Amino acid sequence: MGELILVRHGQANSGAKTEEDYDRLSDLGHAQAKLLGAWMGAHEDPFDLTLCGTMRRHRETAAGMGVSPDTFDDRLNEMEYFALIRDMEVHHDVSPPKSPEDFAVHMPQTLAAWEQATINGSEPFATFESRILSALAEAAKPGKRVLCVTSGGVISMVMRAALGLSTHQMAHVLLPIYNSSLHKFRIRPDGTFLTAFNAIPHLDPPTLADHRTHL
């Protein structure tokens, strides 16, 4: 039996208006990564393989955790949500989200339109899905422990595949994912099985309540 642990990056520049400006950790994001690395060093066994997306926020999270990835793989990069926001405005007359409440409505609408190919963003939905699942299928094998530092959309796509979720359900899995959270899957010859979702044991102390962020 193998194990795959996915880590969402620490808090990025959530006030950004472009993908490029978003793609860097905030001061809090750096702190979250450091706390996660310390917790994992004390509680997790070594990994056989460590993967990391190529985005800056992925690399900064891995560095803050004290992790040296074996492989940087752009197939583990996040969807370009700003491109999807633009397409929703152009093709569906849906305004960009301005608040967390707006985002909670916008995300399911956007993923549905993307899957139905009425918007395309920077890549088709099917390409986003296939690149993620192919990267992890190559890496995650029975008998191996694999750590992967990535993003919330990637994690929700793995959840979709493991649990057979609809796109609507996938969107609602994505929305509550914490920054620097852990998501664990058991890898068996007969499939991939969820064992833990959205865990933040490194942020459990009440004194760290202000470190628990979604955006």
Image (cartoon, grey):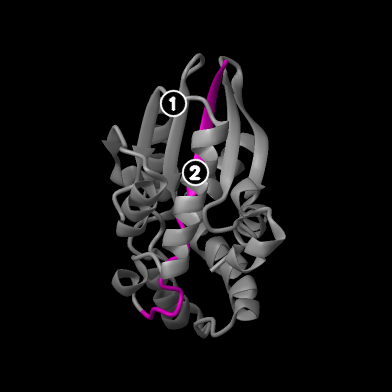
Q: Secondary structure at mark 2?
A: helix
Taking the spot 65% from the left edge, 44% from the top edge, the residue there is 197
Disc 2 marks a residue whose amino acid type is: Ala
Q: Earlier in the sequence, mark 1 or mark 2?
A: 2
| Above or below: residue 100 compared with residue 204 | below
Is 9 magenta? The answer is yes
Residue 164 visible at all = no
Q: Are marks 1 and 2 in contact (CB under 8 Å)?
A: no
Disc 1 marks a residue whose amino acid type is: Phe
| Above or below: residue 93 compared with residue 198 | below
Q: Nearer the viewer, mark 1 or mark 2?
A: 2
Mark number for residue 47? 1
Q: Start and end of the magenta stretch?
A: 1-17
Taking the spot 31% from the left edge, 55% from the top edge, the residue there is 55
Residue 22 visible at all = yes
Is 160 magenta? The answer is no
Q: CA distance from mark 1 to mark 2?
A: 15 Å
- From the viewer's side, name the closer residue of 171 and 197: 197
Q: Quadrant of residue 106?
A: bottom right
Q: Is residue 194 left or right of residue 21?
A: right
Residue beneath disc 2: 38
- From the viewer's side, name the closer residue of 208 and 139: 208
Taking the spot 41% from the left edge, 74% from the top edge, the residue there is 87
Q: Is residue 76 left or right of residue 28?
A: left
Residue 121 horizontal/vertical position (percent): 37, 65
Q: Is residue 143 left or right of residue 164?
A: left
